[in-house]
Amino acid sequence: MKIIINNGRLIDPANGVDGIYTLCIADGKIQQIADSAVDFSADKVIDASGKLVLPGFIDLNASLREPGYEQKASIKSETRAAVAAGYTTLCCLPNTKPVLDTPAVVQLILDKAELAGYAKVLPLGALTEALAGQTLSEMYALKKAGCVALSQAPNSNISNQVLRRALQYASSHDILAVLKPEDLQIKDDGVVHDGAISSRLGLPGIPVSAETVAIAQIIELAEETGARVHLTGVSSARAVRMIARAKFTNARISADVHAHQLHLSELDVGTFDANYHTSPPLRTAEDRDALVAGVAKGVFSVSSGHRPHDVEAKQAPFVATESGISSLETVLPLMLELVDDGVLTLVQMVERLSAGPAKILALDLGQLAVQATADICIVDPNASWLVNSDSWLSRGHNSPFFGCQMKGAVSHTLVNGHLVFEK
């Protein structure tokens, strides 16, 4: 299909473009970008007046649950929710059943994503066999099969000795390692931030050192091995300072923060609502503000940390519930709220969601140049919508934002030049 997108404000941080343009799309690519009328025969014309035309968002951290946990979600349901939220590419974590540690499982996921026909899915292969943290997986075979990186997330059960060997191997084959910084021994049985709220509620706490000790170890091993390392789901102010220093001296280290961590804090846990049971935990307001500042300064990209759950996963007492938020569909409005608050510019917001993650993954995505892949989302920044069952597409309804009025919605999404979502 040949498509023209007219009169939208095109924002492309990768190429320094911000203005009103017309885009002509054919054969899955952007054929022309013009600031005036064009001679182009199109099958469909999209009027983007008053809207933002942006590179499709790229998520570095999402659980799609399939295969193995289809009672929670499926690749089809979550990629459908993704394109409605502006995401055209998702990196799926390896905690499936069977674990994503063989080329056969990689191919299964790629086939299901292609069959669904919504967002692209980029598998993150398991760093160790069965994610057990003991034996290295067939890392090079996983890369050849289509994994854009290898990860132990959302698990952290790997010793420094095994991690060092894994990073040595990854470095020799230029494989990105995506790691969740968390020391399980320090975390112990904690479920919320170790602070005033955990004491008041009588819930076991997770100290900041569970994160910072792990970060210090990972940074040291990355420096020694020369590996490309991405730290996903950072949550504390101390971690912001550590990662900022590390990035200053080592360009092969990167990090992201989940969008909901930029808005919520431990104070929100006060009602024992298990929808606020997250991993990493919601920390103090000061930690939250430091994360926001880190995003503004470019220390972090932003990921969804999407964890869809079935109803039963959140119905037990707080300590017995499963952690995680179904979060893909609230990332855009939460980020636009930071823009409205003057914390981020629109250009910075788009970079943290598209060009930044593309650079981390070393992929030629996240931009809207001529001959670039036509992965595009069109956003109405003023559209208001209520988070409820009627507006929600993810199979997981475990979001603390249900009942909240959100501002900012996607009207169209294109993946490889195909219109996969239209509101």
Image: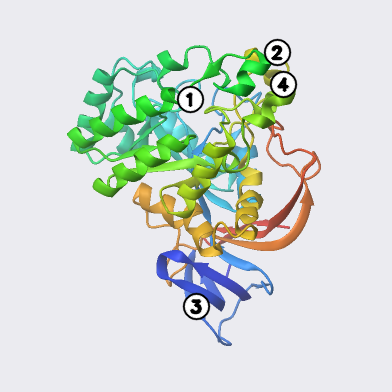
Write the residue at 59% across / 37% down.
Answer: 285
Q: Which mark is residue 272?
A: 4
In this rendering, the label closer to the viewer, 4 or 1: 4
The answer to whether residue 403 is above or below residue 385 is above
Residue at label 2? 317
Q: Which is nearer the N-term, disc 1 or disc 2?
A: 1
Residue at 55% x, 74% y is: 23
- Contact check, label 3 and label 1, Cβ < 8 Å: no
* Pointer 1 residue: 95
Percent position of residue 254, x then y:
36, 44
Considering only order in the chain, which callout, 3 or 4, is on the residue closer to the N terminus?
Answer: 3
How far is disc 1 from disc 2 in space, using C-alphas?
24 Å
Name the disc covering residue 33, or none. 3
Q: Of discs 3 and 2, which sits in the foreground?
A: 2
Q: Earlier in the sequence, mark 4 or mark 1?
A: 1
Q: Tell me if residue 19 comes above or below residue 304 in the rendering.
A: below
**Quadrant into which the N terminus falls:** bottom right
Mark 1 residue crowding within 10 angstroms, few (<14) / some (14–19) / many (20+): many
Between disc 4 and disc 3, the foreground one is: 4
Identified at 37% across, 47% down, the residue is 361
Q: Earlier in the sequence, mark 2 or mark 4?
A: 4
